[in-house]
Amino acid sequence: MSALFTGPLGQLHRWLRVAMLAWAGTTAAAPFDTVNEADFNLRKVAGKPKADCEAFYSVTTSEVTVVSARHMGDHCRVSGVLPAEIRFEVNLPDQWNGRMLMTGNGGLAGQPPEDKSYQALRDHHLALGFATVYTDTGHDNRVHPGGTFAHQRLDTLIDYGYRAVHLTSLASKALIRNYYGKKIRYSYFMGCSNGGRQALMEAQRFPEDFDGILAGAPANDFTGLKFSQTQRMSALLAKPFTPEEVDVLADHIYLRCDGSDGHVDGLLSDPRTCDFDPVQHLPRCDGPDTVDCFDNEEVDALVKYYAPVNLAGKQVYPAHPKGSEGRGPGYGGRVHSGWVPWIISESGRPIMDVLGADFFRYIVFTQDDPDYAWTDFDFSTPPDHLEYTRDILDAVNPDLSRFRDRGGKLLSYFGWADPDINPLTAIAYHDQVNAETQGEANEFYRLFMVPGMFHCSGGPGPTHFDAMMPLIEWVEKGRAPKAITGYHKLDGEVVFSRPLCPWPQQAVYAEGDVKDASAWQCR
C-alpha cells in the first residue's frame, strides 16, 4: 500500500481496504429510463467537495489504482482499475444530491466509459446531482469483442457474471465518501437486458450494495436464453425470412389476436391469450413461394421458432410469445418489425446470431472452440458442466429475503413484445419470489409488463415512461408505485397513453377516451 495521505484523503486507503476485505468474505440496461424530478427536488444539494479532485490520481493500493482524476467543469471524474482488469469510472458533481447511481451494461458488456449511450445517461444524471458509476466488467470489447474475453479466462467470466459490479460499487462508495466527507444517503442501480441481469444478481448476491434497483428486461436466466436464441436462430437460418415476409407474418398474428382485450389497437396486451398457430393460420403457397404465402419449410421453421426449449427431453425455457413481429419505432427512430435487428438483419448478422455463437464458442464448453458451429448444437445431449455456467451467469435465486430485510426496493419492467428475451421469464421469476415470500413480493418487488414494447425500448406500445422516479419515491418516501404512466410518441408528440400496472394487475378499459391513460384502470 502506498504512503498514507494527510487531510481528507487520509482515510481513503482504509475505507477501500475495509470494503475489499468485506468482499473477500462474501459468497459468491425504455432506453434506460432517465430520472425526472417529480414532486421533490432531486437537485437539492446534500454535499459539496471536501477534497481536491486531482489528489485522487495518487491513489494506488493493492485494491484499486486510480489512473485518471480531473475536474471537468462541474464535476470530478475519476477513472480506476480494480483487480485484475476491471475498469470503472466515477463522476462526482460539485452540487451533489447525496445519491449514487450505477448504470449496468448491455449484451456481453465491455463497453468503455466513452460509449455514447452511457455518456448520455451519465450527463443527464450528473445534471440532477447524482454521483454516477460505471464499469466495463473487466474487459474492453474493442480489444476482446463479443465473448472472446472469456476464452480460457474463468476469472474474467466471473467478473462479467457478478464480481465487477459488486467491487465497483464498494470502491465507488469509498471514493464518494472521501470526496464529500459524508456517507451516501441512497444508492441506486439501473440496467436493462444484461444490465437487468446484473440488477437481479445484485439483489440476490449482494443485497447491501444498493437501496433501490431498477431491472429492465432482465436476462436473468442467461443460460436458458442462450439455448432459446440457438433454437430460434437455427430454425430461421435454415429458412431465412425477409423483413417483408415478417410483416406479412405479423399481419396474420395481429389479425388473429389483436382485440383479445376488447380493443383492436395494434397491441397484444397479454400475448399468453394469443392462440395463433402457423400451421393452421398462415396462407400456404399453392405455386411459387411469394411474400404473401408460406411454404412448408417456412411453416416448419416457425413451428420450431415458437416451440419451448427442451434439453435431453426436459423443458428449460418457455415458448416465445407472439407480438414482437409487429412494427414500431425502433433503432435510429425508424419504424420496423421488432425482429430487426435481433432476429433478421437488413445488413450483416442478426444480433441473436452473434450472441448465441459466442456463448457456445467461448463460454459453455469446457474446451473453448472458436470455430464451433453453434447451429449444430445437439439439444438431446447438454454439456456436462452446464451447472458451472449457470452458477456464474444466471440470476434466478428467488430468495431475496436479505434484500427485503435491509429495506431494499426492486422495480422491474419488461416489454411484452421483446424479440430477444422471453417476457414469460420475468413473470415466472416474480411468481417464484412471491411464493418464497408467502404472497408478499409486491411489498418490495414490483414488475411492470409493457404491452407492445420491444427489447428495452421501442415498439408500438406505451414505451416512453419514467421508472426510476417511482423507484426513488418508493425507497425514500415509502410510496410504492400503484401504476406508471406510459406514452407512445411519434415525432415527439404523444399519440396515446396507458397505465402500466404492477403484476399481476393489468390495464383494463373503464370509460372515456381510449387513448388516454385516465380511461384505464389497473385490476
Image: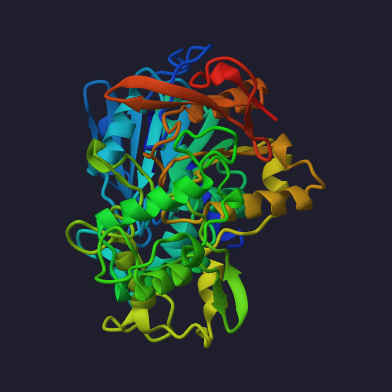
Query: Does any portion of residue 213 appear in the rendered image?
Result: yes
Q: Please tell me which residue lies in front, 127 or 237.
A: 237
Q: Work out whether 411 lies above or below 516.
A: below
Residue 93 appearing in the image: no
Q: In the picture provided, is 254 more to the left or to the right than 212?
A: left
* Up/down of 169 relative to 22, above or below: above
Q: In this picture, is 41 found above or below 186? A: above
Image quadrant assignment for residue 363: bottom left
Q: Nearer the viewer, residue 353 or 61?
A: 353
Give the image quarter of residue 512: top right
Residue at the spot 38% in from the left edge and 86% down from the top edge: 367
Percent position of residue 60, x then y = 33, 49
Q: Could you say where residue 491 lies in the image, as x and y percent from the top left? A: 27, 24
Relative to 379, is 191 above or below? above
Q: How many marks?
A: 0
Quadrant of image for the C terminus: top right
Extreme right residue here? 438
For this orientation, the residue located farthest to the left is: 347
In percent of width and height, residue 298 lies at: 36, 70
Q: Give how far across and how far down residue 219 sits, in percent.
A: 49, 56
- Residue at 59% over, 22% down: 473
Residue shown at the point (47%, 64%) measured from the top left: 278
